[in-house]
Image (cartoon, rainbow, N blue to C red):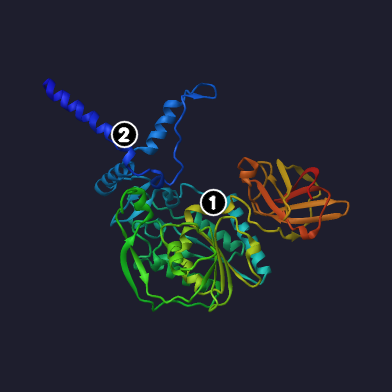
Amino acid sequence: MNKAVKIIYAALFFGICAVPLCAAPFVESNAEIEKKELAEMPSIVKDGSLNTDFSTEFESWYNDRLPFRSELLTAADYVKSELLSSPASTVITGSDGYLFYDGSKADFMDTNAMSETRLRATAVTLSLIEENVKAKNGRFLFFCAPNKESIYGEYMPACYTKAEETNLTRLHALLSEYGVTYLDMKQVLTDNKDQGLYHKRDTHWNYLGARLGYNAVMDALGKEHKTYADAAYTVTKDWRADLDKLLYPAGDGILDDQYRFDIEWDEFEFAIPAGVEDTAAQLENFISDKEENDTRISTKNYDADGRLYMVRDSFGRALLPFMIDNYEKAMFVRTTCPELSMVSEGGDMIYEIVERNLRNLTETAPFMFAPERSISLPADTAGEVKRMEAKNEGYACRIYGLLPDDTDMSDGRVYVTVANSAGAHTFEAFPVCESKMLGEESEKAFSLMIDPALELSGEYTVTVTTGGRSYTCASKAIF
């Protein structure tokens, strides 16, 4: 290679490398594309001395702002996914055009099995929620929206082996044991999978799957409802799927099919968000792939009857039009910390969560006053609690803590007794670890809120009972 060719080659190489820098002032910021807070420009001097992490921090700053970043990622992922059929951007490329979320493969293969203690804690938590709803003469239903792999696993690459038993199947068995009213949505969808109920390039069910799921939910709940069985629909290729977005952040990607129903919905209004004039446009935004400001939605439909409190995640968005059309008042919240005070007397509560997030059900205790119980305390104590915190938060006294690591919690039930010279009260606690407040994780934990209407005050001793053994802690003023 002669000298001139070498010079041209080097100039071309450095010229290409310089393109992003030269183009930086003229291209769109990556802030909207990344959907995150971008790294800040680092300082050479930090806290009065040389910043030894400057090169690493600068690299993060530059990477976040690299022009054409999304286009480069899109091109790379297209080659990996469409041409090489290899995993890219946390997306698994299956057969027949199916994409799957890499984060769900552990559920599919059962490599993330929840412990028996965690599963029982989940079942007990749901049973206490249902007890509270029924005490208000209401109806409760829990259902888990299955991962796409659980329904269409035959399109997963052969290297991923489907497990016979999963967290979901084990939880269903325990829900039956604890008397929790639940719907086996996995079975409902499996029985009808030939209809094509999930998007090929998205983790969620399409509107056809949502209609099927809605009817199954209402049937299981015992709520009289419209079925929309005869509603006509058209198939449009206009859905910007979430997995496709991960693969191709730039441009429109490869659009997916969506089933658009021809349904004349009852007129309704939004209580939350307030001041919505075009309800149809706002609802369309809520059920779209955008998921903007949909943490708390409240609606009024005067042509329907009944009240609904629905705890949901992204799977629940496609159910919104059906539910709104069948309840006079409905509230939809995206949370795993339900507020049971929001359940009306005689109202319905639906609790939906996607399979891959099952363990989130016990990340924090629901916002609910603990029910009082009558139990006999063991004659002898097994020791002291590992840690206990008590806070009077105005609306309630919250007591939570950790038990010794060797505590037997095989039945999932935990009781907390507060006592002083005036008497004793025993409550059933949620077997949940308040890890964010405690700063540590443990499956041997408890959490409860005591109703201020009981007018307890003063200094109390606290005894925690589980598995037929009691644990004490130092006396303290908790009210």
Residue in view at x 33 percent, y 38 percent: 25
Q: In the image, residue 270 lies at what x, y percent?
A: 53, 68
The residue beneath circle 2 is 21
Disc 1 packing (10 Å; few <14; some 14–19; many ≥20): some
Horizontal placement of 281 versus 7: left or right? right
Residue 359's tag is: 1
Q: Considering depth in this image, is 272 or 190 the residue closer to the camera?
A: 272
Horizontal placement of 182 versus 462: left or right? left
Disc 2 packing (10 Å; few <14; some 14–19; many ≥20): few
The N terminus, quarter of image = top left
Against 60, residue 44 (above or below) is above
Identify residue type, mark 2: Leu
Q: In the image, residue 312 lies at what x, y percent?
A: 52, 60
Q: Earlier in the sequence, mark 1 or mark 2?
A: 2
Residue 474 in view, yes or no: yes
Q: Considering depth in this image, is 391 or 131 the residue closer to the camera?
A: 391
Total labels drawn? 2
Q: In the image, residue 177 lies at what x, y percent?
A: 60, 62
Name the secondary structure under disc 1: helix
Nearer the observer: mark 1 or 2; the answer is 2
Q: CA distance from mark 1 to mark 2?
A: 44 Å
Residue 374 in view, yes or no: no
Name the secondary structure under disc 2: helix
Residue 56's tag is: none
Residue that extends furthest to the right in the rendered view of this protein: 421
Q: In the image, residue 243 lies at what x, y percent?
A: 37, 52
Horizontal placement of 289 versus 350: left or right? left
Q: Considering depth in this image, is 109 or 86 the residue closer to the camera?
A: 86
Residue in view at x 64 percent, y 62 percent: 340
Identify residue type, mark 1: Arg
